[in-house]
Image (cartoon, coloured by chain):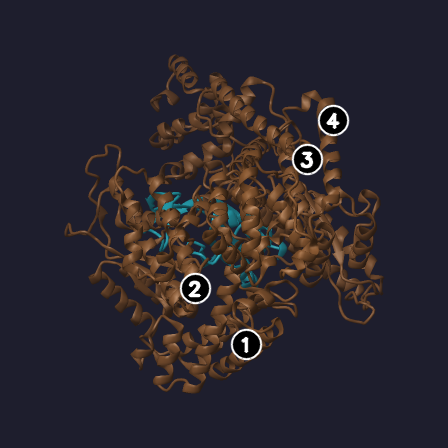
């Protein structure tokens, strides 16, 4: 089991959600976050006024999937979230030691 | 201002809060106070919002409807993470303004934003909030659909794309970043790309079931989607239905698929139904567009799709005036291009009949009377923006009537958009400049009102609200900043002035006038033929128009005496001309445009030398006549024989333009003066070329020198205005930070001709800030990047904006490094970094033509060095030539679009670009080793390549000769007014006229030579680059 954590542009959330549903991933956790990567520090001109790019609104998606689905889920997220411009986001894959469904006490993949 | 503490404080403070909100302009302060409370449900929320609260309140109060803005803001916040949202509001300079404006103007856009809250962050990206061209939108849609394979998911993604774009376009519209033309164009392009996608999906599905549709010879046939109405004119509203018609190539049966075979008619009907359902179906994500098919032959009773033959038969028998009027706007929006081109040709023949179509004057008058009657019946509809008195329909009707009357002969009038058509009708003299301007302004006003009415709820309403508060809110959506009651009164006054003027024009225009009292005697057809007119009927008709005025566009009575004196002098001048037919055509246009300028006609009647020159000019170039039509007073420039005989150099042009800087002129006066001076100079430059005083090279050099002088004057104007506001840009050591202007393209290569854009970019030395203005109080210091970016933007406006005096030069900034990012100027460091990291071969290739035309010498040396290093630092491996050849191939297909009846001198096979690409590619290969080949000019580069042994000298010589020929053809086309530029339409009059201008004995001889030369060029291109 792995946890896939993706930080994406907020407007891409609907696309990513729909693309994940299309490949059969139904559960996910979505959080609105603020963050920055390589964009930080440079200045941008927005409609004539200049501002320093600092924290930008992003969306974090977390999905836990069985090992064999990891590649497919990652490529689906990357495909759906990509715009080709700076700030498209990142995907991280983390190991999961254990998972437990609270209601039933089931563990392992059946609890996901 | 309301202190933030009020939001969290006790009941005693609530009263104060309500009073403050009322003062700020909230109509329902109690509800607003409740909304504020709901906006920050916890003390923590209030704390995060506190820093931006003051700004937010100011923005909300300035919104067209503050109550609605706040209410929508609260509902939006309820659906997102408040801490992220509030911090975005305080961090981002544009967030509060954008939200207040959008949420306070449009309930419909507010709902869209609430359904897709993530779109806000996208709207706050600089890259989002610019104009998206059709290509950008197509790319955006493709990207949105790429992750999905099932039909359902793709249909949903299409809807998300549409709503996202509506938000972007609506926001730019409401913020004033895009004018009406851009807004309606972008909305139309969104519909176009969605249509194209719906067509691809529907066609693929039908193909899988029934196989490809085949004609009776067994080759595949396709279908074109024809946009009509507002979509056809690229003038779509937010809530317009899209008017469509469908046409397929030929009857036959399909090749057969999973579900057998079918007649083509059935196949395409299936595709059409599917397209409509893909667009109209309401899914979880809403709908894409509502489709209206009622403009098709037989309306609701007719079949959904017809073959080209079907359309031809129907229109041949049935085309009524309203159908011809509707077809004026027909445009191929998507589908099979070949079928589309054939439909366009067919529609053109239905709409435009050769010659002046007098037969339709009466039906037009009849239709106009019907419009009047409909108005008298429904008195409450008078204030209807579209159908009411002085409304949109009256303008459109007037414009379309003139198109139908005169578009048969004058193809320049065959335009779809209303504002563009008004502009062209004015250019050609069918509308007086005053009337043209008034109609165009009225149209923009009325369409903007229509937009602002409809953007509220996305309803298709055209009625002004009766309730005063609602009318006030409409006025505020339109940009009146007063309190609602006053805004409503001021709007109403303006609206009444506009509609009254439109209605007056409409009434006058169609009013029936008595025929002229006394007719002048015209020469007989026999006499005209004997004196060299090839088409005496046409000549007689033109003479009548010259002396009596055009139907619906008569002269002022005061001109008659002058015209009577002009008559014999004109005939005399025409008989001496080698092409009297064309001379008379153009002269008629010129005179019609000069309109009521009696002084001018008197000048012509009294000075045979000027008239003779003008007639000669009329036969030689549409473009010059065009210049004179827009500014007849330029004619006096040509009265001086000295100005006509001697080519000028840069210094003389600079001296001529110096008058722009005369003291005590306003910036606007300076801009207009720059335009007029430049146009007067250009007129003499072109005159010298046209009359053989200069060669094509000398002509280009003169144009280039004129452009550089104009650029220098424009840059000085742009920079001065900014220095007044921000001070002088300084570096870290306090020294002035200079900039240089780098020219590319034709300007870089000194190959400019009339009508060329100026491709430029600006490089400044180093970062830093301006030192603030000497006097102004409200001014601010900005950093050097902002300063010079603003200067470039201003430069583009100073030279390119179309003002009452026309335009000087269109400035094209698309070739600048990193053109899609923000900012128009680059620091030297950023420039090098950009090309190192991002630049591709195409950009490197365009830099072969770079030449520094203006600016600080020391910096120029550094920039030149940097550019040389970028272009010629490492030789281009010959293997990479493939890429250049591929780009060339795409240009030929996508921009050249040659057909058996159409040649493109620039992009076509063996055209100018073949020679230019060949030279540039070899420069990139050999420039590293042979510095002498690094010339921005094509001819010089070819010669140097031959000397360096990179090209056989026979080939180089031949190429130079062919290039020169092609440039002369291109210049002749431009001067003769071919539209679009650089296109030779073999069926039209251009080949013969170019042949004449280039001294070929016949049209045939010219075309043969053209074919041989382009074939030779293409052969050399292939040999050199593969």
Same subunit, labels 3 and 4: the answer reads yes
Numbered disc 3: secondary structure: loop
Numbered disc 4: secondary structure: helix
Q: Residue under circle 1?
A: B1014
Cβ–Cβ below 8 Å for labels 3 and 4? no
Determine which of the numbered discs, if any, sits on residue B553 in the image. none
- Report the chain holding disc 3: B
Q: Earlier in the sequence, mark 3 or mark 4?
A: 4
Give the alpha-carbon distance from disc 1 to disc 3, as whole Å. Answer: 54 Å
Compared across the picture, whether B705 is left or right of B445 comes to left
Q: Earlier in the sequence, mark 2 or mark 3?
A: 3
Front of the two marks 3 and 4: 3
Q: Residue under circle 3?
A: B515
- Chain the render paints cyan: A
Same subunit, labels 1 and 3: the answer reads yes
Residue B307 pos. (x, y %): 79, 58
Residue B972 pos. (x, y %): 51, 64
Q: Viewer-proximal residue, B623 or B475? A: B623
Q: Residue under circle 4?
A: B373
Q: Is residue B589 above or below residue B343?
A: above
Residue B620 pos. (x, y %): 52, 60
Cβ–Cβ below 8 Å for labels 2 and 4? no
Determine which of the numbered discs, if any, sits on residue B689 in the image. 2
Question: Image quadrant of residue B453?
Answer: top right
**Farthest residue, direction left:** B733
Front of the two marks 2 and 1: 2
Front of the two marks 1 and 3: 3
Q: Earlier in the sequence, mark 2 or mark 1?
A: 2
């Amino acid at each position: 089991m792995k946890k896939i954590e993706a930080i994406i542009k907020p407007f891409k959330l609907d696309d990513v959600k729909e693309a994940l549903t299309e490949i059969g991933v139904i559960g996910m956790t979505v959080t609105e976050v603020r963050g920055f990567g390589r964009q930080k520090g440079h200045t941008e001109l927005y409609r004539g006024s200049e501002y320093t790019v600092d924290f930008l609104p992003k969306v974090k998606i977390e999905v836990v999937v069985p090992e064999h689905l990891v590649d497919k889920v990652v490529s689906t997220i990357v495909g759906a979230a990509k715009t080709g411009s700076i700030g498209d986001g990142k995907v991280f894959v983390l190991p999961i030691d254990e998972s437990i469904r609270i209601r039933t006490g089931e563990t392992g993949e059946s609890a996901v | 201002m309301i202190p933030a503490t009020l939001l969290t404080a006790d009941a005693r403070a609530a009263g104060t809060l309500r009073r403050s909100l009322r003062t700020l302009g909230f109509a329902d302060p109690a509800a607003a106070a409740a909304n504020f409370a709901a906006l920050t449900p916890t003390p923590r929320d209030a704390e995060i919002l506190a820093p931006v609260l003051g700004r937010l309140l100011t923005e909300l109060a300035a919104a067209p409807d503050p109550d609605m803005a706040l209410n929508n803001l609260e509902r939006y916040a309820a659906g997102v993470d408040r801490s992220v949202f509030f911090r975005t509001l305080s961090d981002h300079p544009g967030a509060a303004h954008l939200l207040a404006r959008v949420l306070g103007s449009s309930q419909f856009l507010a709902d869209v934003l609430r359904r897709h809250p993530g779109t806000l962050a996208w709207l706050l990206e600089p890259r989002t909030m610019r104009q998206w061209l059709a290509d950008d939108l197509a790319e955006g849609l493709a990207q949105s659909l790429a992750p999905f394979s099932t039909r359902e998911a793709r249909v949903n993604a299409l809807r998300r794309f549409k709503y996202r774009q509506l938000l972007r376009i609506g926001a730019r519209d409401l913020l004033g970043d895009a004018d009406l033309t851009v807004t309606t164009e972008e909305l139309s392009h969104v519909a176009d790309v969605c249509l194209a996608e719906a067509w691809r999906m529907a066609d693929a599905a039908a193909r899988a079931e029934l196989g490809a549709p085949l004609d009776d010879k067994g080759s595949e046939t396709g279908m074109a989607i024809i946009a009509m109405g507002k979509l056809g004119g690229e003038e779509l509203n937010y809530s317009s239905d899209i008017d469509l018609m469908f046409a397929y190539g030929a009857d036959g049966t399909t090749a057969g698929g999973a579900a057998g075979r079918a007649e083509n008619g059935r196949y395409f009907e299936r595709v059409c139904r599917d397209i409509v359902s893909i667009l109209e179906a309401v899914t979880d994500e809403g709908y894409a567009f509502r489709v209206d098919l009622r403009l098709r032959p037989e309306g609701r009773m007719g079949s959904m799709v017809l073959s080209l033959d079907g359309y031809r038969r129907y229109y041949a028998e049935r085309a009524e005036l309203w159908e011809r009027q509707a077809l004026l706007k027909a445009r191929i929006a998507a589908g099979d291009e070949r079928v589309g081109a054939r439909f366009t040709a067919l529609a053109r023949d239905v709409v435009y009949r050769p010659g002046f179509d007098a037969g339709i004057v009466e039906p037009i008058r009849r239709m106009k009377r019907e419009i009047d009657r409909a108005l008298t019946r429904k008195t409450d509809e008078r204030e209807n923006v579209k159908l009411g008195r002085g409304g949109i329909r009256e303008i459109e009707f007037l414009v379309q009537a003139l198109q139908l009357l005169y578009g048969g002969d004058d193809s320049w009038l065959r335009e779809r958009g209303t504002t563009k058509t008004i502009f062209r009708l004015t250019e050609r003299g069918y509308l007086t400049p005053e009337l043209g301007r008034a109609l165009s302004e009225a149209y923009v006003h009325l369409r903007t009102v229509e937009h602002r009415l409809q953007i509220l709820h996305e309803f298709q309403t055209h009625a002004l609200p009766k309730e005063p508060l609602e009318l006030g809110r409409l006025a505020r959506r339109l940009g009146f900043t007063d309190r609602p009651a006053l805004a409503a009164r001021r709007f109403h006054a303006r609206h009444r002035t506009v509609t009254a003027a439109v209605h007056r024009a409409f009434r006058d225009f169609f009013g029936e006038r008595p025929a002229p009292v006394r007719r002048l005697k015209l020469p007989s057809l026999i006499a005209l033929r004997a004196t060299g007119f090839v088409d005496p009927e046409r000549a007689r008709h033109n003479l009548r128009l010259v002396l009596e005025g055009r139907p619906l566009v008569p002269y002022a009575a005061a001109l008659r005496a002058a015209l009577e004196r002009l008559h014999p002098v004109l005939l005399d001048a025409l008989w001496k001309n080698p092409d009297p037919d064309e001379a008379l055509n153009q002269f008629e246009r010129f005179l019609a445009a000069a309109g009521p300028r009696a002084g001018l006609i008197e000048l012509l009647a009294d000075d045979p030398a000027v008239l003779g020159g003008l007639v000669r000019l009329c036969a030689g170039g549409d473009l010059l006549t065009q210049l004179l039509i827009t500014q007849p007073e330029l004619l006096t420039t040509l009265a001086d024989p000295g100005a006509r005989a001697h080519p000028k150099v840069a210094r003389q042009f600079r001296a001529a333009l110096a008058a722009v800087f005369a003291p005590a002129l306003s910036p606007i006066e300076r801009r207009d003066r720059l335009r007029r001076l430049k146009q007067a100079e250009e007129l003499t430059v072109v005159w010298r070329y046209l009359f053989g005083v200069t060669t094509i090279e000398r002509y280009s050099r003169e144009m280039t020198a004129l452009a550089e002088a104009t650029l220098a004057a424009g840059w000085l104007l742009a920079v001065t205005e900014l220095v007044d506001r921000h001070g002088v840009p300084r570096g870290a050591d306090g020294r002035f930070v200079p900039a240089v202007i780098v020219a590319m393209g034709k300007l870089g290569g000194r190959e400019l001709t009339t009508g060329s854009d100026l491709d430029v970019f600006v490089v400044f030395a180093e970062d830093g800030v301006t030192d603030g203005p000497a006097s102004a109080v409200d001014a601010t210091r900005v950093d050097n990047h902002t300063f010079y970016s603003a200067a470039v933007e201003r430069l583009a406006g100073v030279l390119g904006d179309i003002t009452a005096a026309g335009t000087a030069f269109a400035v094209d900034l698309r070739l600048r490094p990193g053109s899609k990012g923000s900012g128009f100027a680059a620091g030297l460091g950023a420039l090098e970094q950009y090309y190192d990291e991002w630049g591709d071969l195409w950009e490197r290739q365009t830099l072969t033509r770079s030449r520094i035309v203006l600016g600080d010498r020391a910096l120029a040396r550094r920039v030149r060095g940097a550019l040389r290093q970028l272009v010629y630092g490492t030789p281009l491996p010959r293997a990479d030539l493939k890429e250049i050849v591929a780009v060339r191939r795409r240009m030929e297909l996508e921009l050249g679009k040659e057909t058996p009846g159409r040649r493109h001198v620039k992009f076509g096979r063996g055209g100018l670009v073949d020679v230019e690409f060949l030279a540039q590619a070899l420069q990139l290969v050999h420039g590293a080793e042979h510095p002498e080949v690094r010339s921005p000019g094509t001819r010089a580069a070819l010669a140097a390549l031959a000397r360096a042994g990179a090209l056989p000298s026979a080939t180089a010589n031949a190429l130079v000769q062919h290039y020169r020929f092609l440039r002369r053809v291109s210049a002749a086309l431009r001067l003769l007014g071919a539209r679009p530029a650089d296109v030779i339409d073999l069926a039209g009059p251009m080949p013969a006229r170019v042949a004449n201008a280039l001294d070929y004995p016949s049209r045939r001889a010219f075309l043969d030579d053209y074919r041989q030369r382009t074939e030779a060029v293409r052969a050399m291109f292939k040999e050199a680059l593969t």
